[in-house]
Amino acid sequence: MRLSFQLYTARDIEPLDPILELLGRHGVSRVEGWSGNYDTPGFGTALRSRGMTMPSAHVPLGLLKDRAFRRYLVEEFGVARLIVPGVPAEILAHRPSCLELARELADLSGDLSAEGLRLGWHNGGAELAPMRTGETPIELLLAAAPELEWECDLGWLASAGLDPAVVLQRHGTSITALHMRDVAGPDGDPAQKGGAYIGSGVLDWTAIGQALSFTRVDLLVMEHDHAADVPDFLIRSINYLDGWMKHAVAAPSHQQR
């Protein structure tokens, strides 16, 4: 597995050079892009000059259907895995619209596969809320679009009252990436709005590490929606994950960054 950093965490930092330099000093050479990065002049060059890559990128569904834009992401940033960051909650709340979305994703995954690309889905909270039928939207999407890969956000699982380790075991064949996001307990820092540095919140990271053997995870993406201090979040999280990755049950490459 490889360690990466979701650049949305640093959305309020401009330019991003200090963050890229910090990542490089700590041995992290991968980032995950979001919409705020793609039209930043010279950003692809800034990554390449530091020996960094962007193997995955969050792209809104409408823009993801634009073949020319997909080609731009591949050529400029070397993206191989395109991930839908979500859709309006009302689409996911009703079975017919959720199934229609799944059909769109199934068709799109075929197009991307023909281009040598992978299609993923990043969950928020709406995908985890049961419908009247008892099904959850994420279950419908994965069943109706079997080629879809799930970038599983562990923080959203915990916020929804789910046990991340149980989810990894149950849906592991679809899960190929993790958003490594921790959730604060009742005594957490209010400035971080419910978030926590990785390893300092309520998630059971030992159990999550043990559940990795049920998955196809090959990418771990650090994220914090409201980090009070992004560099401090990165340093402390990387230090924690260095130890965690050595004990997590995963493929032989799991210690590589």
Image: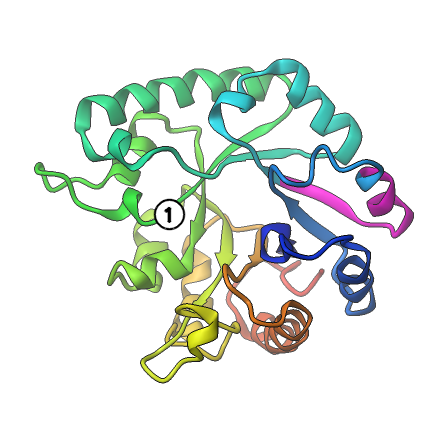
Image position of 76 (left or right of 239): right
Residue 116: percent from left, percent from top: 64, 23
Q: Is residue 118 above or below residue 187?
A: above
Say which residue appears at 39% left-offset and 49% top-offset. 172
> x, y percentage for residue 91?
27, 29
Q: Which of the two residues, 111 or 66, is positioned nearer the viewer here?
A: 66
At x 44%, y 28%, the residue is 147
79 or 229: nearer the viewer: 229
Label 1 secondary element = loop
Q: Quadrant of residue 66?
A: top right
Label 1 Cα neighbours within 10 Å, binned few <14 / some 14-19 / many ≥20: many
Label 1 sits on residue: 124
Q: Is residue 8 above or below residue 239?
A: above
Disc 1 marks a residue whose amino acid type is: Gly
Q: Residue furthest right?
A: 49
Residue sitting at 33 percent across and 24 percent down? 102
Q: Return the x and y of residue 216 as percentages of the image width and height.
A: 49, 48
Looking at the rendering, the stretch of residues picked out in magenta corresponds to 44-56
Drawn side of residue 229 relative to residue 212, left or right: right
Relative side of 221 to 211, left or right: right
The question of residue 52 being in magenta is answered with yes
As drawn, the residue found furthest toward the bottom would be: 187
Q: Position of residue 26 (x, y in %)?
A: 77, 69
Quadrant position of residue 157 = bottom left
Question: What quarter of the picture does the N terminus occupy?
Answer: bottom right
Residue 92 on the magenta segment: no
